[in-house]
Amino acid sequence: MSEHVYKHIELTGSSTKSIEDAVEGAVKRAATTVRNMRWFEVEQIRGQVDQQQVSYWQVVLKIGFTLEP
Amino acid sequence: MSEHVYKHIELTGSSTKSIEDAVEGAVKRAATTVRNMRWFEVEQIRGQVDQQQVSYWQVVLKIGFTLEP
Amino acid sequence: MSEHVYKHIELTGSSTKSIEDAVEGAVKRAATTVRNMRWFEVEQIRGQVDQQQVSYWQVVLKIGFTLEP
Amino acid sequence: MSEHVYKHIELTGSSTKSIEDAVEGAVKRAATTVRNMRWFEVEQIRGQVDQQQVSYWQVVLKIGFTLEP
Amino acid sequence: MSEHVYKHIELTGSSTKSIEDAVEGAVKRAATTVRNMRWFEVEQIRGQVDQQQVSYWQVVLKIGFTLEP
Amino acid sequence: MSEHVYKHIELTGSSTKSIEDAVEGAVKRAATTVRNMRWFEVEQIRGQVDQQQVSYWQVVLKIGFTLEP
Amino acid sequence: MSEHVYKHIELTGSSTKSIEDAVEGAVKRAATTVRNMRWFEVEQIRGQVDQQQVSYWQVVLKIGFTLEP
Amino acid sequence: MSEHVYKHIELTGSSTKSIEDAVEGAVKRAATTVRNMRWFEVEQIRGQVDQQQVSYWQVVLKIGFTLEP
Amino acid sequence: MSEHVYKHIELTGSSTKSIEDAVEGAVKRAATTVRNMRWFEVEQIRGQVDQQQVSYWQVVLKIGFTLEP
Amino acid sequence: MSEHVYKHIELTGSSTKSIEDAVEGAVKRAATTVRNMRWFEVEQIRGQVDQQQVSYWQVVLKIGFTLEP
Amino acid sequence: MSEHVYKHIELTGSSTKSIEDAVEGAVKRAATTVRNMRWFEVEQIRGQVDQQQVSYWQVVLKIGFTLEP
Amino acid sequence: MSEHVYKHIELTGSSTKSIEDAVEGAVKRAATTVRNMRWFEVEQIRGQVDQQQVSYWQVVLKIGFTLEP
């Protein structure tokens, strides 16, 4: 590990299943445009309620990835 | 969608199973007294430890619902 | 319940499976050195990304336990 | 002014016009069910974007009112 | 203790005497409309100054109570 | 609405007129490079003072937009 | 611009009209005792409710000004 | 009450007796240089420990006072 | 005073009497295992409600003590 | 200075030498892809420990730059 | 040390060299008008970027000083 | 890297020289009692002022280390 610079992006992932699934969906989507992802941080957990039930889990997260030198 | 006013209530849901289950339990209970729920936000995740193991997941959440005009 | 004093420790648990599993792993490890644990609070949820996928869930938590008088 | 107790409620007001209008709409709506309102605090300012323009201002606020003794 | 849901309300208590007295006044007032109160959290301590002296202690607190299932 | 992923960007808009105008200016500028904007959140309101008067309102905001799947 | 030192003061401005007007009132008042004001930051937006309507907007702000070397 | 501007100052009061006494000491000291104090907010409660016992309560507070127009 | 290193521990003290008493109880308990305590900071004030009255004051605090070089 | 819009990006710089060096490294790297940088804000200071010594300083910072109109 | 009251002031120091130098500059400037300074707290670290390089370190700090009784 | 559990401790390091030196002093002291340190986070930067000059830099930091399984 050397004197890297990392960039952070902020996304919201959503899922009908779980908090983990919403995070994984966001990471998967990010993988289509960003390389060398290293870590994520959950910033907020929220969701939609429809018909008086939880319909979507929404997770705001930051993802950090290494910038090529 | 028009110029609605939403009210927020704050609850703690608890579950022996998971964070998601604690949220869903709180939303289900709220549904018995509140109509037109729209979203929730998780404010804190905590729990009880008994016999040196996690016994309850407790999730503090805010629920927002549309007030009738 | 009387005029107890509680001590708090802060740990990070990690798991390849879920947020709940990372918390339970940390509580289990704490149980080898601390007695009378009473509650925990999740302070941060984060994780590692390897090969463009979530590889580890890491949960920072505080655990409170009763001090013997 | 004596040893009053005040209750707080949290609302989101929305308006197509301005932040002030969103607050005033929420206070007006609250006036239909709550008496003796005394103050408000803005907690968050957000909004909707439709067709690439701001369509709604949404203001989360707390309102405090005196409880009858 | 089972899978309860708790509701939180936010109040400001006021007292000419002390912080503790302001909290106890708010809890006493809440007891006239809410059952099964379990805990409180102090969110802010403030007060009025009249004639260059502290005239009122005002304490913002949240109270949690068990909802009947 | 399905399992979307949203991206957030952070901007500062500035205006000599009002807070709302600073937000709308930032949204308008963002519209030249970003599609499918859905919401914004105000994060900070500040400004410049010149000749002892407010000369600019500056509003830091986050904008969320839907990523194409 | 050189190695300046800036001082910050904190004020609350109030207005019956708008948030912007409350800020401008506070800056105008500060101008009677402070020179070389450079920027302001809004720290809180709140207000009074009288007769079930918003009567005053109150804005807490910090003002920064250059100290003479 | 009209369109006043209020100034805030921040002090730490200290007392060997209690939190309330530390606040009252700070308000009393402020009264020697500032007029028209209106409110205070407690920002932090801390203290010194000497000989393994609490020796001083230290309370950081903000005091707001009306500026003459 | 030289180039010391201080360690911090976090405790919750509880008391049926007052906030100050809860802090002093925690400091007294800490004195049985820790030497050279120097300061404390209150992090949260909360409590239990039983039979519709405050039964316990609970104060979360950090204590700092000098480590022997 | 006119009605500019600024964009913010978030980076982590790292350095074996100092906090300032980590910030300067991140600014230098950003300069390869972003023009018209105007300011930065430090959001977090952290680092790696290897062989029981600080091996890397890591500084999370936001950088603001002017968007071309 | 007795029942002192301390006042806090907030400044921004700036330096082309380092964070420490910006703090020391602010303390030196404060020393021309304030006596009995006791401590400082760094509240924010930021800076200017000119020609794609860090040109100024700016540090917001609070300084506490003893008020004469 | 496997399913480790990490423990965090909180220290204040102090130095007459610099922020970095205060951190390194705390890490060095911690190394006498703790093994497998992995990272640190700066939580607060403050200091002492004596004779109207900065005499000590004090840095509050958290250190994380791997617990043996």
Image (cartoon, coloured by chain):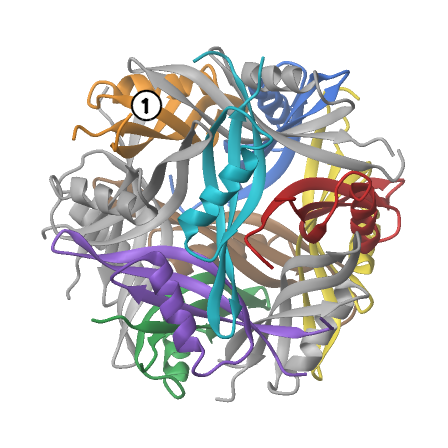
Chain colours: B cyan, C purple, E red, F orange, G blue, H yellow, K brown, L green
Q: Which residue is mark 1?
A: F38
Residue H33 location, x and y as percent?
A: 80, 45
Asked if K40 appears above or below L1 in the picture, the reply is above
Tell me the quarter of the picture where residue E51 sits: top right
Q: Residue at x 21, y 39 (%)?
A: K51
Q: Position of residue E13 (x, y in %)?
A: 79, 43
Q: In the rendered image, which quarter contains the C terminus of chain F? A: top left
Q: In the depicted view, which residue is nearer to us: G2 or L50?
A: L50
Q: Numbered disc 1: what chain? A: F
Indicate the position of residue K66 as horizontal and vertical percent values: 70, 61
| Residue B16 visible in the snapshot | yes
Q: Residue at x 45, y 58 (%)?
A: C42
- In the shown orientation, is residue F24 left or right of residue K33? left
Amino acid, disc 1:
Arg
Q: Residue at x 35, y 57 (%)?
A: C19
Vertical side of L43 occupied by F10: above or below:
above
Left or right of residue L6: residue E53: right
